[in-house]
Amino acid sequence: MALNCCTQLADLYRNCETDTLINYFAKFAFRGVLNNPTKTVRDSLINQCAQILACYRKNCASPSSAGQLILPECMKLLPVYLNCVLKSDVLQPGPDVTIDDRAYVRQLISSMDVADSNVFFYPRLLTFTKVDPTSDSLPVAIRASEERLSKGEIYLLENGVNFFIWVGANVQQALIQNLFGVSSFSQIDSSMSALPVLDNPVSNKMHAIITTFRAQRPRYMKLLVVKQDDKLEMFFKHLLVEDKNLNGGASYVDFLCHMHKEIRQLLS
């Protein structure tokens, strides 16, 4: 069923919602892998995205150099989100991803609304050491890339399924004491599934954030504490979606260049 909602193509691109598109593309692709080779599904996604952006360039954008990548304002994040879908365990499973894991993620995404699939594919990453314990506000989320991490900071990451606390090796001793109730980085128990309840503003703020984030999601998010260079860190880094991953998934910059090449081929 097609419903004519506007008469100008430019209006369509001006009012589109990238989050909704990605939710649709993910469900479309995750259904497609049941009957088609994974590579075929991946190529189809890239081709559809390239056609959307090439159509905008051809019919709506101001004339400019062919070497310049022009994206609609509402779709500037389409390539980064599409790359996250392509690097998912369903479309690009690693050697340690089982059939059960893939089936679980397929079912998970099939029932997700737009807001949940948005944070699942591009997790929310915050610098906890930038949080004001006396304020109700949160710092602006930072880009999900390892180069954004600092050894002297603590970061919070959530993807709607799990909640991570990443602790750098050089975090101040006072902060570790206030959060974990131990005196040094080496004493932090990375197997804990709940933080100790301590009577100080830092601990209170962390518990408040965890409670708030969990209330925003339909599933109870499991808490995982990840110490820098710990064995669990590989799982955490898998969620830093702007980076190249171990399964061969492209970094955001590399994928953007690939999309630009696809668009230019369609226009030539």
Image (cartoon, grey):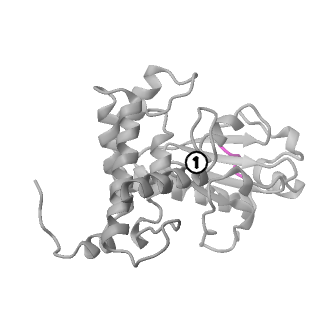
Q: Residue at x 33, y 59 (%)?
A: 52
Pointer 1: residues within 10 angstroms few (<14), some, or many (20+)? many
In this rendering, position of residue 222 left or right of residue 62: right
The overriding secondary structure of the stretch rendered in magenta is: loop
Q: Residue at x 47, y 26 (%)?
A: 101
Name the one closer to the observer, 171 or 14. Answer: 14
Q: Residue 106: x, y in percent?
A: 37, 34
Q: Residue 115: x, y in percent?
A: 39, 56
In this rendering, does residue 110 appear at all? no
Is 196 magenta? The answer is yes
**Residue 143, placed above or below residue 120:** below
Name the one closer to the observer, 215 or 127. Answer: 127
Q: Please tell me how many numbered marks the rendered image carries.
A: 1
Q: Secondary structure at mark 1?
A: loop
Q: Residue 194: x, y in percent?
A: 64, 42
In this rendering, does residue 53 appear at all? yes
Name the one closer to the observer, 234 or 26. Answer: 26
Residue extending farthest to the front is 268
In this rendering, position of residue 28 left or right of residue 188: left
In this rendering, position of residue 94 left or right of residue 115: right
Residue extending farthest to the bottom is 62
Q: Residue at x 62, y 54 (%)?
A: 144
| Quadrant position of the C terminus in the picture | bottom left
Is 60 magenta? The answer is no
Q: Residue 96: x, y in percent?
A: 58, 22
Q: Which residue is mark 1?
A: 241
Q: Residue at x 60, y 60 (%)?
A: 208
Q: In this picture, which residue range is highlighted in magenta?
A: 194-198
Q: Amino acid at mark 1?
A: Val
In this rendering, position of residue 232 left or right of residue 249: right
**Residue 28, placed above or below residue 123:** above
**Quarter location, residue 103:** top left
